[in-house]
Structures are given as C-alpha cells and as structure tokens.
Image: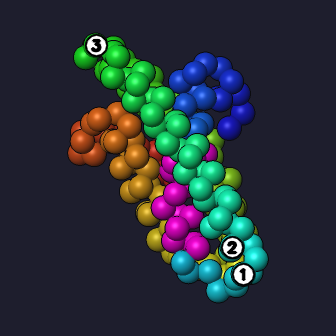
Amino acid sequence: MGDLPIGNWQGFLAFELHYEMHIVASLLVKSRTSKISDPESAKFSVTRIQPEGAFHRLGVVNWWQRKYDQGSPAEKVDLAAQLLELEQEGQKRRNAYLKEHWQLTHQAIGTDINDLPRIYDAWRREVLAYFLDIPVSQLPQLVSVND
C-alpha cells in the first residue's frame, strides 16, 4: 500500500479498513471451503488469531465511531469523502496483491471460489456503509477488486 498508511490518519484508517475489515468475509469463506486443513493451525487460529483480530477490529471501529460522532454533519461529509478517496486509492493499490494471494491460497490449501472477488466487493461496500453511516445504495461507485 506504499506510503498510504503513513501520510495521515485518514490514510492509516483506509489501510486498517483493508487490512482488518475488508478481508473478513473472504477469510470466513476460505476457511470453510479449503480442502487441506492442519488441525494444529486451525486450533491456533481459533484460540489465538481470531480473538486477537476481533479485539483489534473492535478497537478500530470504536475509535472511528467516537471520532465520527463528534463531527458536525458538514464535518462528517468531509471526513467520509476524505476516507473514501484514500480507501479507493488503497483498493487500487491492493488489487494485484489480492489476486495473487487468492491464487496462492488456492494452490496451497485447495480453495476454489470463483466468486471471491464479488464476495470481497460486496462485503467492502457493507463495511464502508456501516463505517460512514451511509446506505449502500448511496455510496459512490467503488473500485472493484477486478479493476
């Protein structure tokens, strides 16, 4: 994602959305559809990785909601526009990585989900709608993972 996460707090939040939030649906789908499973790795994931990830995600959501709720309606529009612009740039930068990652995952553990990009895009729209308190139908056209 290059310099995006270190430019300002909005860039860091855009990075966090990609790193922590947008991947949740694809992680769940991949975990349920993989053909190769390591019981010890699965146990470690359930007992350590998933709870720590959830704790971090909740922290990001709570921080953002406190900040966003303090803004006036005009400030919220401005914050949403700033975040969407950087989030869109982050998605453009991340698309090639995601496609390569999904291909490697398919080779490594046997997942074969043709609609994973559509699932990712749909989940991303829902996350942004929730974060920005904007109905999905009112979000601007988003960069797709297939772009």
Q: Residue at x 53, y 24 (%)?
A: 10
- Graded by Cα atoms within 10 Å as few (under 14), some (14 to 19) or many (20 or more), the crowding at tag 2 reads few
Write down the residue under mark 3: 72
For residue 23: magenta? yes
Disc marking residue 39: 1
Q: Nearer the viewer, residue 49 or 96?
A: 49
Three-letter residue code for mark 1: Pro
Of the two numbered discs 3 and 1 in the rendering, the one whose residue sits closer to the viewer: 1
The secondary structure type at the circle numbered 1 is helix
Up the image or down, 82 lies above or below 58; here it is above
Q: Position of residue 58 (x, y in %)?
A: 49, 42
Q: Residue at x 42, y 21 (%)?
A: 67
* Tag 1 near tag 2, CB within 8 Å: yes
Q: Is residue 126 left or right of residue 120?
A: left
Pick the quarter of the image with the N terminus: top right
The residue sitting at the front extreme is: 47
